[in-house]
Amino acid sequence: MSVQKLTLPSPAKLNLMLHILGRREDGYHELQTLFQFLDYGDELTFAVRDDGVVQLHTEFDGVPHDSNLIVRAAKKLQEQSGCPLGIDIWIDKVLPMGGGIGGGSSNAATTLLGLNHLWQLGWDHDRLAALGLTLGADVPVFVRGHAAFAEGVGEKLTPVEPEEPWYVVLVPQVSVSTAEIFSDPLLTRNSSPIKVRPVPKVNSRNDCLPVVARRYPEVRNALNLLGKFTEAKLTGTGSCVFGGFPSKAEADKVSALLTETLTGFVAKGSNVSMLHRKLQSLL
């Protein structure tokens, strides 16, 4: 008897650095970035149904059911695999939307990997990542599940092993428009390429930070407050801001001080996604 129901984590990610090398003819930007996962995220529950219907039972404000990345991922996989089965999906959502920590992309990847398991499709990561890329540039890194140096629009991935500190992540109560940031005339678009080896420690800047900080005072405030304790960085185009600490105790201490006025959380950096650790344990 095959498994009919499954609950899986959908982890957050951080961009430890993000350099913009130029704009391509198709309008996308050439990037170099370093992805690492957090042991913190949403949780998705899947239950197989035999009528072919894909149903997400959790509503998202302002996101129509069929536009949700979770539903789009499920339907694309169903379509491309020819699988006659359907799925019921519930999500326990803790990751902010528009936060730069990969919420939607991670949910899509968890859906692809979860359904590949439940529907017994036997697709490998290459095939799932290729499908994931059609949903978003950040989906493949979540499908592959390993910290990576990413190039291109973020889809060319080289596995890396950066340090795994504890992070304080602050969540300014504002949703940043990625399209708005990437079309800003003041955005740096001519960073010099860096080599993947060794893992970049210097050049750990995010080229989006000056533009985001200028446009969003809430993000600027979070960077300033966290910056009193450690190097404060922006992940993706924000809004989330993070800083690393050598121990949970230190991270907890700083978080306690800052979360009196700001929303945030503490999480361990991880080079292997907790989704992949969970799937591995099911084999």
Image (spheres, helix red, strand yellow):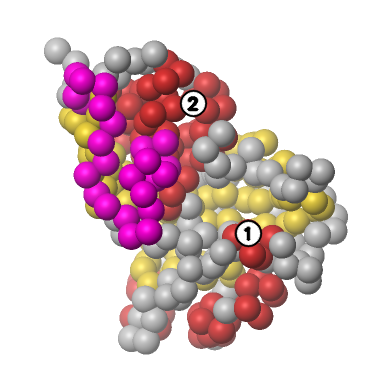
Q: Residue at x 63, y 78 (%)?
A: 215
| Residue at image mark 2 | 128
Please state which amino acid type lies under the numbered disc 1.
Answer: Ala
x and y percent of residue 1 in the render? 14, 13
The answer to whether residue 66 is magenta is: yes
In the visual, does 279 lie left or right of 34? left
Residue 2 seen:
yes
| Residue at image mark 1 | 179
Packing grade of label 1 (10 A; few <14, some 14-19, many >=20) is few
Please state which amino acid type lies under the numbered disc 2.
Answer: Leu
Q: Depth-wise, is mark 2 or mark 1 nearer the camera? A: 1
Q: Which residues are magenta?
A: 48-72
Quarter containing the C terminus: top left
Q: Residue at x 19, y 19 (%)?
A: 50
In the visual, does 169 lie left or right of 28? left
48 up-or-down from 183: above or below: above
Packing grade of label 2 (10 A; few <14, some 14-19, many >=20) is some
In the visual, does 121 lie left or right of 129? left
